[in-house]
C-alpha cells in the first residue's frame, strides 16, 4: 500500500512540476506563429494556443495517467507470509 501511494504521489508531483515548467516556458511563446485551437466537441473551442503548449499538456496528462494506472495495477503485498513460486 505504501508503494502504491509513493508511486501515485511521485507521478502527481512530477506532473505538477512539469506543469509549472510548462507555464513558465509558455511565456516565451508569445511570438510563435503556429497557434492551434482545440475543438471541445460541444460547439466550443479554446483560445488559440501555441502548439508546444498543447503537446506539453498532453505529455503531462500522460505522465499523470500512467502513474495512476501503474499504482492501481501494482500487486498487493501478501501479509500472510506465503512463499512466492
Image (cartoon, rainbow, N blue to C red):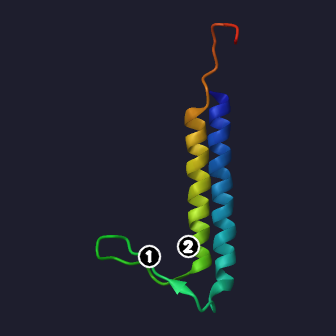
Rendering coords of residue 19 (x, y %): 63, 64
Please tell me whether mark 1 sits on a helix, a strand or a loop.
loop
> What residue is at 29 percent from the left and 71 percent from the top?
42
> What residue is at 64 percent from the left and 20 percent from the top?
77
Structural crowding at the residue carrying mark 1, measured as other residues with C-alpha within 10 Å and reported as few (<14), some (14–19) or many (≥20): few
The residue singled out by tag 1 in the image is 38
For residue 47, what is the image quadrant?
bottom left
Q: How many numbered marks, from 0 up?
A: 2
Relative placement, left or right, of 39 versus 49 is left
Indicate which disc, 2 or 1, sits on the residue closer to the N terminus: 1
Q: Note whether 2 is above or below 38 in the view shown.
A: above
Q: Residue 54 carries which label?
A: 2
Q: Note whether 16 is above or below 8 in the view shown.
A: below
Structural crowding at the residue carrying mark 2, measured as other residues with C-alpha within 10 Å and reported as few (<14), some (14–19) or many (≥20): some
Please tell me whether mark 2 sits on a helix, a strand or a loop.
helix
For residue 55, what is the image quadrant?
bottom right
Relative depth, front residue between 72 and 12: 72
Location of the C terminus (image quadrant): top right
Rendering coords of residue 52 (x, y %): 62, 76
**Label pair 2/1, CB-CB below 8 angstroms:** yes
Rendering coords of residue 18 (x, y %): 67, 62
> What residue is at 55 percent from the left and 50 percent from the top?
65
Residue extending farthest to the front is 85
Relative depth, front residue between 24 and 32: 32
Q: Distance between the residues labelled 2 and 1?
A: 9 Å
> What residue is at 63 percent from the left and 92 percent from the top?
31
Q: Which mark is residue 49?
A: none
Rendering coords of residue 83 (x, y %): 70, 8
Q: Note whether 10 is above or below 30 in the view shown.
A: above
Location of the N terminus (image quadrant): top right
Amino acid at each position: 500500500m505504501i508503494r502504491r501511494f509513493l508511486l501515485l504521489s511521485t507521478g502527481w508531483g512530477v506532473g505538477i512540476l512539469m506543469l509549472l515548467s510548462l507555464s513558465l516556458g509558455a511565456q516565451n511563446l508569445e511570438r510563435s506563429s503556429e497557434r492551434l485551437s482545440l475543438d471541445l466537441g460541444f460547439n466550443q473551442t479554446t483560445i488559440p494556443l501555441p502548439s508546444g503548449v498543447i503537446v506539453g499538456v498532453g505529455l503531462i496528462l500522460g505522465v499523470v495517467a500512467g502513474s495512476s494506472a501503474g499504482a492501481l495495477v501494482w500487486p498487493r503485498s501478501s501479509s500472510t507470509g506465503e512463499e512466492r513460486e
